[in-house]
Image (cartoon, helix red, strand yellow):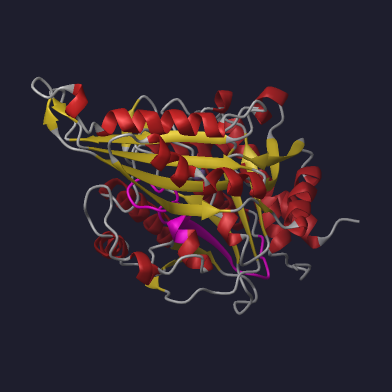
Amino acid sequence: MATYSDLDGIAAAAAIDEARLWSHLVGFGEIGGIGGGGVCRLALGEEELAARRHIASWAQSRGYRVFVDPVANLFVRREGTDPGAAPVITGSHIDTQPQGGRFDGAYGVIAALEALAALDGASVKTRRPIEVVAWTNEEGVRFTPGAMGSMVFSGALALSDIAGRRGSDGVTLSAALASALAATPQATFRPTVPPIAAYVEAHIEQGPELEARGIPIGIVEGIQGVRWFDIEVSGSGAHAGTTPLSRRRDAFQDALRIVSALNDWTSDRGDVLRFTVGRFDLTPNSRNTVPARASLGIDLRHPDANVLREKGDRIAAIAAAAARYCAVSVREVFTKAPASFDAAVIGTIEAATRLLRIPALRMSSGAFHDALFLNDVCPAGMIFIPCEAGISHDPAESITSVQAAAGARVLAATLVALAGADGDVR
Ligand code: HGY
Ligand code: MN
Ligand code: MN
């Protein structure tokens, strides 16, 4: 027997406008566009502030209220029939990698805004308010750690502990946050975190599974754990022509020894453990000067908490032992254990795919997402759509308008069920 939520969910999904969504996604991707389909919108940078202004004015033009919190998370609120009820929150991030794709993060925000427009178009009223959020600094490129906005929001990180931290460009987080808060004057400052009924995030898969199987929707059951380490190798700068190798403290050569030792330590025949040296900076980085310092950004991931702990806990000792001439410091800058999403939210997403007769696959996520931290404070889940060849964190990242619309339809029906008019929300 169809419930009000089912009927409203079908109506909302039917009101998702593929052309309108695609045009919004393509237009949004031009904010910070770098050509070749790529985007560079580093957290709280000028391009991302432009994206914030876009979202806030889009929201205001549709009569939605806009809020920001102390870490500049940006919220667009559609009222429910019970304004005092805890909202259902959906969204993702709008910051990108330095040569990122147009859809990582942005898809989850723009698809959520499209879902609000569809709810309006279908005149669907939900009991709970629905808020669309753009979380601050999910990528962790300019400021560490990643998922900063959702970590502060969920209490996993205290803003006071990181406000003085400087970004890769030397700007302090507090100064960057001040410019972000000033960028959307129409947003009401909301210092406290509202109770949340549920959180659901739509995102591109960033992996090949859905496309390879020809399945349009992924129902994410959980996310693997992640640990980030900064390794600083300190030697001595010297003249490349006059300094014999026997008298060098070459930070690059010792960094190579460290990476080689860590490659051995993290090698995994099953190809499940993910060890990446994604950042490698040399100082002074000049061909004819022996490197004085090497700075490495390490990313380690695994779905099993015990393996992640065992492999991560030895990194400092292995790095120190591998270096021959230089001093080595290792700092863990981000860590999150693997997590499983809420069974009821997973079930609600699955019910929405069945209601809309859209094939779906239960799966886990190799990438982390803000949902990983929301999962600590409310029932949370994620909806994936395929992306071409699983490519992400690269300008070649690509989806189709059909894939985008399918995800938005499932999101709209899920939001109606979670914020349901007939009070069936958990
Ligand atoms: O790194 C991640 O997993 C995410 O895409 N920021
Ligand atoms: Mn992302
Ligand atoms: Mn990403």
Counting from the top left corner in percent of width and height, residue 267 is at: 57, 29
Using residue 155 as the reference point, say whether residue 385 is left or right of it: right
Quadrant of the rendered structure where residue 372 is?
A: bottom right
User: Which quarter of the rendered picture does the C terminus lie within?
Assistant: bottom right
Residue 50 appears left or right of 73: left
Q: Residue at x 59, y 49 (%)?
A: 309
Q: Residue furthest bottom?
A: 84
- Indicate the quadrant where residue 258 lies: top left
Q: Decide which of 23, 108 is in the foreground and name it.
A: 108
| Residue 417 coordinates in the image, percent (x, y) | 73, 59
Q: At 27% from the left edge and 47% from the top edge, which residue is drawn?
A: 168
Asked whether the viewer can see residue 62, the reply is: no
Magenta residues, dominant SS class: loop
x, y percent for residue 303: 65, 43
Q: Is residue 131 magenta?
A: yes
Q: Which residues are magenta?
A: 124-149
Single out the residue that lies furthest toward the right. Answer: 1
Q: Is residue 159 left or right of residue 123?
A: left
Instruction: Please state, as top left, top right, bottom left or bottom right, where the N terminus lies in the image.
Output: bottom right
Q: Count the marks.
A: 0
